[in-house]
Amino acid sequence: MAKRRVIQFHPYDPTHPNVGGIGSVIHALIKFAPPDFDIYFVGVSVDIQRHPVGRWQQLELDGRSFHFLPVMEAPVGRREKIPRTLKFAYALWRHRKQIDLRGALLEFHRIEPSAIFWLASNHKVLFLHGHHGKDYYNPKSEVKWSRFPAIYFWLERHLIARIKQVYIVRADAVAHYQQHYPAMRDCIQFIPTWVDETVFRSLPATGRTQLKQQFAQEHQFDRGKKILLFVGRFVGQKDPLLLLQAYLEFKRHRDDTVLVMIGAGELESDMRRFIREQGLEADVRILAPRSHQRISEWMNAVDCLCLSSAFEGMPVVLVEALYCGVPVVSTDAGEAARLIPNESIGRLVREHAPLPFMQAIRQILSQPSDPWACQQQAAPYTAKTVLLGLHSRYRELLDSVDAEPPSAAVR
């Protein structure tokens, strides 16, 4: 029996370490795809020497075989005047004849690239990773559509009619989209984000101590200090400068912590300038993106994960940290309240300002940690649990495709 074909589209390189939530979701969708699925990923290449643009390759991701076609180069750290998602859509159009659509389910994580396949009769699935009806009006948004939201929503209104299934990681966004697109009400559903439980796990106390000592030696800080961790893109949405401002306030009360920030993005130079001007060089470490395995190790070595986002969907990094047994401090963004229902596992900061964030960190570090309670809170959101229903829906859509396939490529 032929395998069910799923083609994923996103301006992302699954072979390169990434700290973005969408990247983590795509990584898991490839890794945990059932054996009866044949996965094709159409994305971008960070390293065109290893993964040339316009050439299909068969690769492995954590032991799972998949096919990869980069349609454009996307070097890390380059500022882009034209939104990457629009460049990606144009690149898809240029390489469309290399993409065999026959009998395939098409999966998108932004709606714009779906325009290239407007005429294709394939079933299409769209993931929305936030509440665009609110996010694009947020002054912290780095998405260039936030300058022209009316144009985006005009485009969305025309494209979403061709989508068969919409999954959204924010409950309030589900209600918003169901209201705006009543004809699609039954096709728009909430889906929680998930943790890869094969990588992220809570280690015993001895393992945590060993990792803390190892990282203290590697990055030259006192092994007796408590560690605060930030993992994410250095962009306005994640607001890492708010965390730095809160940490500066925190240092005025106690001097027994170090802040580790893992990520990359356009705000990194501003962050380094703030650290230098405020004399925080001895207490803050900025590290480049790491593999999921390395992030899991960091989470087992730290005392608290901090999320300072201005807006969110359902933050993957919170689920990962909790599953590793780490308490969290987060702004009240997106589905954070779903993940932090009580003070035994974290603090929810409702005012987006340095002082209340600092106070929340102080409270967490002053109470005994409860790794078991943290892990239990994240237990319903393991990849295998969440993706079970998703894969059933994919099979339903794929098995409903007519016997006569559509044309092999977009014309």
Image: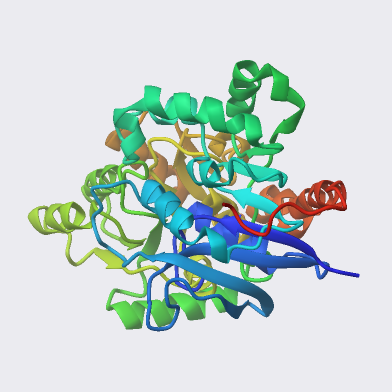
In the image, is 45 to the left or to the right of 103?
left
Pick whichever, 373 or 187, lies toward us: 187
Identify which residue is drawn at 72% across, 53% down. Answer: 379
Instruction: Tell me where residue 367 appears, x and y as whole percent.
Output: 50, 49
- Let me know if residue 371 appears in the view: no
In the image, is 225 to the left or to the right of 322?
left
In the image, is 82 to the left or to the right of 348?
left
Instruction: Tell me where residue 133 appears, x and y as whole percent.
Output: 48, 25
Instruction: Tell me where residue 266 appears, x and y as whole percent.
Output: 24, 53
How many dots with numbers? Answer: 0
Q: How is the image coloured?
A: rainbow
Pick whichever, 38 or 18, lies toward us: 38
Instruction: Tell me where residue 229 appears, x and y as whole percent.
Output: 40, 59
Is residue 62 placed above or below 269 in the rendered structure? below
Identify which residue is drawn at 58% across, 48% down. Answer: 108
Identify which residue is drawn at 38% across, 76% down. Answer: 47
State which quadrant residue 191 falls in. Answer: top right
In the image, is 297 to the left or to the right of 67?
left
Q: Quadrant of the N terminus?
A: bottom right
Pick whichever, 403 or 350, lies toward us: 403
